[in-house]
Image (cartoon, rainbow, N blue to C red):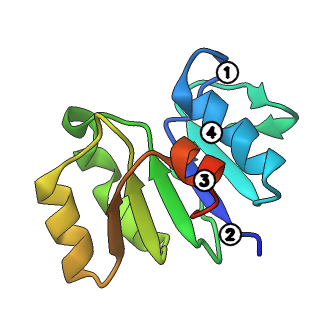
Amino acid sequence: MSKKTVVIGASTNPDRYGYKVTVALQRNKHEVVPVGIKEGEINGEKILLGKPEIKDVDTVTLYVGPLNQPEWYDYIISLNPKRVVFNPGTENPEFENILIKNKIEVIEACTLVMLSIGNY
């Protein structure tokens, strides 16, 4: 079953995890919406800039470090995702508590690993 996933911190750089996960989600037949701060595309998918309105979000996967997350808090909550995945290096107890209070599931894991072992 496809899980519409918003990648926060998407990048056109193939060495960045925000790029790698977008391709991996596509390969695993998930609808993916890359959101970043620079124009471009990943494997044919346009990177959306700013904080675009996106409906029916299942998962937000984070590739933005804790120091840069506060500007994303309200936006991510407004997407009303079922869950937010904090990838290694993005863990943020403050934001995690805010999400939990908003009844959004918090997962500290690597999206790429979750996809590779089939528990995404």
**Which percent across, then down, holds residue 84?**
41, 63
Amino acid beneath label 3: Ile
Mark 3 vs mark 4: which is more N-terminal?
Answer: 4
Q: Quadrant of residue 24?
A: top right
Q: CA distance from mark 1 to mark 2?
A: 22 Å
Q: Is residue 98 left or right of residue 12?
A: left
Q: CA distance from mark 3 to mark 4?
A: 14 Å
Residue 55 is marked as none
Q: Nearer the viewer, residue 71 or 31?
A: 31
Mark 1 vs mark 3: which is more N-terminal?
Answer: 1
Question: Residue at left 35%, top 75%?
Answer: 105
Q: Secondary structure at mark 1?
A: loop
Q: Which residue sits furthest right?
A: 44
Tell me if mark 2 has few (under 14), some (14-19) or many (20+) residues whose alpha carbon lies within 10 angstroms of its own.
some
Residue pointed to by mark 4: 21
Residue pointed to by mark 1: 12
Q: How many marks?
A: 4
Q: Would residue 50 be seen by someone viewing this image from the given angle?
A: no
Q: Secondary structure at mark 4?
A: helix
Q: Which tag is nearer the camera, tag 2 or tag 3?
A: 3
Mark 4 vs mark 1: which is more N-terminal?
Answer: 1
Amino acid beneath label 2: Lys
Residue 117 is marked as 3
Q: Is residue 55 left or right of residue 36?
A: right
**Which percent across, then down, holds residue 8?**
50, 44
